[in-house]
Image (spheres, rainbow, N blue to C red):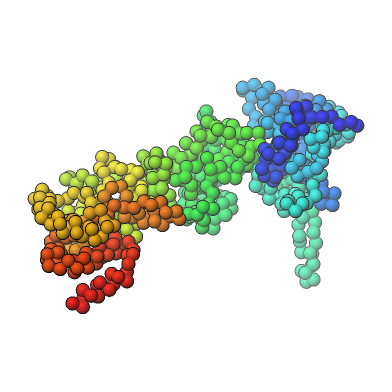
């Protein structure tokens, strides 16, 4: 029989379907099973509206069979089947979908879920096979027909025979190549895994004969294999069950099995939304971070399903980065999918689902913080850095969503508190939220700059995460109170008398301070200060970049050249101040030595490296030996 050409304009179109639309060969089985499921849905719908179609739902099924020697794999269903004309229309015209036409012809009051609507999923089978045979018998006909094709060169249709209505698609699996092992699609274990991964929640049983290895003689340790028909899919997803029918341990077991975690989740969030966009979601907040969570290898995303068929294993668009720790599934029939089902088009439905999910997660965290503080603190110690990053990222676009979820260590309470709690306890005259940054709580507590603020009995937030200061910079203020770094040179807690006194001391010693500044050119300014209580010196900064920020930039692989503008402040009431004044008048060389030592001391206190430690060590020894 002469081959018929496909009705598409060119051979290149089919090549595009096979080689470009689908990037993952494994999904061919998902597509064929979804088509079979659609055929079963159609005939069941027909049975409800057409008295001549007599089928029972419990008898509808999909069957997989494979033959390793002949390299054959078949997918069968006892659905509505196709006539010769339907084979011609649906398989002879690329991108023509019988399912889509069927759904289009339904009335608004009729409700049936059809998975395949674009008519190209079938052709994905050519990725793994060099010949496809489709044997089909329509429920409306006594005749069966066989459609055959070896690819873009065309196809043939001839009369055949078949028991019962339905369709059997048989693939002649390609030979293995150096690049790909096609034989895996003839392996029982691989086929079971593919069904479990992509088609576990198809509403009809997917059956296959599987091998059971059973003990025949215990004494002789003899085993025998026998085949048994087994249903491979669970059919009803846990997120579609009534909440009253699902136990907490069922959710825990699903999470641990689905997401390969050894511990149960911290929180389970189940939602069912009906409206312009309908969907069901089952989300989990893990109790601990995955081993690769803070690495580039980690992939965020929720498993995306359409009518129980997995579309994407990790749909990143459903989660904002700051909630990337959340695991879970989303199932919707309202998503606008492209013809391959592998990628989502720019979809308003998807954006709406993502927005709702983001709000749902945030509300759950807010409730946890309010009602189960210790649980929230445990969560925050694990994932708090990600929330702070969310405040800072995207130029602070999401800061208002997250500002009440972030926590910082309080010097006053010696524990994590929220910004709201800090502001609620501020003194009446206090007009700023004070913070200090460092590598650890202990190191921050020993900073000279902390003394003045603590003396005022103001609380200080201790920031120890690399992202903390960037978070504060993005927030700028909270409830009208600006964030102020205690190491900022512009910190203003002095009385008017103290300011005047400090101003006069600096004016009287202008030449001395300029000489020190000339000696240590790394600093922008040297000045006497009333801020310090017991410490002789400290480094403060001018501008937006703090010393701790500079450390973050310095740690980056590419030198960004971003440096803090530092100021060396000297305690005007410390004996070292008088020593400097004396040396400046009587011994310029010794004055230079003291200047270098004091600057190095200030850098050490600030956690900055000393560029010339050998020279400074020698200078200190020279001073001590006098």
x then y, percent, for residue 357: 48, 39
Judge left or right: residue 201 versus residue 4.
left
- Corner quadrant of residue 224: bottom right
Judge left or right: residue 293 versus residue 536.
right
In this view, the residue in front, 289 or 254, is 289
Residue located at (28% from left, 72% from top): 617
How many numbered callouts? 0
x then y, percent, for residue 392: 38, 45
Residue located at (48% from left, 54% from top): 294
Judge left or right: residue 508 versus residue 227.
left
**Vertical relation: 199 (above or below) 346:** below
Can residue 134 be seen here? Answer: no
x then y, percent, for residue 399: 37, 41
- Corner quadrant of residue 611: bottom left
**Vertical relation: 351 (above or below) 541:** above
Looking at the image, which residue sits at the far right?
A: 1
Residue located at (79% from left, 71% from top): 220
In this view, the residue in front, 75 or 212, is 75
Considering the image in quadrants, where does the N terminus appear?
Answer: top right
Considering the image in quadrants, where does the C terminus appear?
Answer: bottom left
x then y, percent, for residue 323: 46, 45
Residue located at (34% from left, 53% from top): 563
Can residue 496 be seen here? Answer: yes
């Amino acid at each position: 029989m002469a081959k018929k050409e496909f009705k598409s304009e060119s051979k290149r179109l089919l090549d595009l379907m096979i080689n470009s639309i689908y990037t993952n060969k494994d999904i061919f089985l998902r597509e064929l099973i979804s088509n079979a499921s659609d055929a079963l849905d159609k005939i069941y719908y027909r049975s409800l509206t057409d008295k001549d179609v007599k089928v029972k739902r419990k008898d509808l099924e999909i069957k997989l069979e494979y033959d390793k020697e002949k390299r054959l794999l078949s997918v069968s269903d006892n659905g509505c089947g196709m006539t010769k004309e339907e084979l011609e229309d649906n398989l002879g015209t690329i991108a023509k979908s019988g399912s889509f036409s069927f759904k289009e012809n339904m009335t608004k009051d009729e409700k049936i879920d059809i998975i395949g609507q674009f008519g190209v999923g079938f052709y994905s089978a050519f990725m793994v096979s060099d010949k496809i045979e489709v044997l089909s018998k329509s429920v409306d006909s006594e005749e069966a027909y066989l459609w055959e094709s070896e690819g873009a060169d065309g196809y043939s249709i001839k009369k055949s025979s078949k028991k019962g209505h339905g369709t059997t698609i048989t693939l002649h699996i390609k030979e293995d190549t150096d690049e790909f092992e096609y034989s895996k699609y003839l392996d029982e274990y691989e086929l079971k895994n593919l069904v479990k991964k992509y088609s576990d929640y198809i509403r009809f049983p997917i059956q296959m004969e599987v091998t059971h290895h059973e003990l025949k003689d215990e004494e002789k340790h003899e085993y025998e294999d026998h085949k048994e028909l087994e249903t491979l899919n669970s059919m009803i997803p846990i997120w579609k069950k009534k909440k009253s029918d699902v136990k907490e341990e069922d959710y825990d077991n699903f999470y641990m099995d689905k997401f390969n975690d050894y511990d149960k989740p911290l929180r389970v969030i189940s939602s069912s939304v009906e409206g312009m966009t309908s969907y069901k979601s089952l989300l989990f907040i893990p109790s601990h971070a995955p081993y690769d969570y803070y690495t580039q290898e980690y992939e965020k995303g929720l498993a995306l399903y359409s009518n129980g068929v997995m579309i994407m294993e990790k749909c990143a668009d459903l989660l904002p980065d700051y909630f990337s720790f959340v695991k879970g599934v989303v199932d919707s029939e309202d998503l606008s999918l492209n013809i391959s089902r592998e990628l989502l088009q720019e979809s308003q439905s998807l954006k709406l689902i993502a927005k709702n999910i983001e709000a749902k997660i945030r509300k759950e965290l807010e409730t946890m913080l309010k009602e189960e503080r210790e649980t929230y603190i445990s969560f925050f110690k694990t994932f708090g850095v990600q929330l702070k990053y969310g405040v800072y990222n995207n130029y602070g676009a999401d800061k208002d969503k997250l500002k009440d979820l972030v926590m910082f260590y309080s010097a006053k309470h010696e524990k994590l508190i929220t910004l709201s709690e800090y502001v609620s306890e501020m003194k009446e005259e206090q007009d700023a939220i004070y913070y200090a940054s460092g590598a650890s709580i202990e190191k921050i507590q020993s900073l000279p700059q902390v003394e003045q603020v603590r003396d005022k009995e103001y609380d200080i937030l201790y920031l120890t995460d690399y992202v903390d200061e960037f978070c504060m910079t993005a927030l700028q203020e909270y409830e009208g109170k600006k964030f102020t770094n205690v190491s900022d040179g512009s910190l203003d807690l002095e009385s008017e008398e103290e300011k005047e006194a400090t101003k006069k001391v600096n004016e009287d010693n202008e030449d001395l301070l300029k000489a020190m500044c000339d000696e240590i050119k790394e600093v922008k300014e040297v000045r006497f200060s009333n801020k310090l209580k017991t410490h002789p010196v400290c480094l403060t900064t001018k501008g937006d970049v703090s010393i701790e920020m500079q450390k973050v930039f310095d740690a980056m692989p590419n030198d960004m050249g971003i440096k803090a503008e530092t100021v060396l402040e000297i305690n005007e009431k410390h004996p070292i101040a008088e020593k400097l004044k004396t040396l400046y008048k009587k011994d310029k060389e010794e004055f230079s030595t003291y200047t270098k030592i004091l600057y190095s001391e200030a850098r050490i206190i600030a956690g900055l490296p000393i560029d010339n430690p050998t020279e400074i060590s020698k200078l200190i020894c020279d001073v001590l030996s006098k």
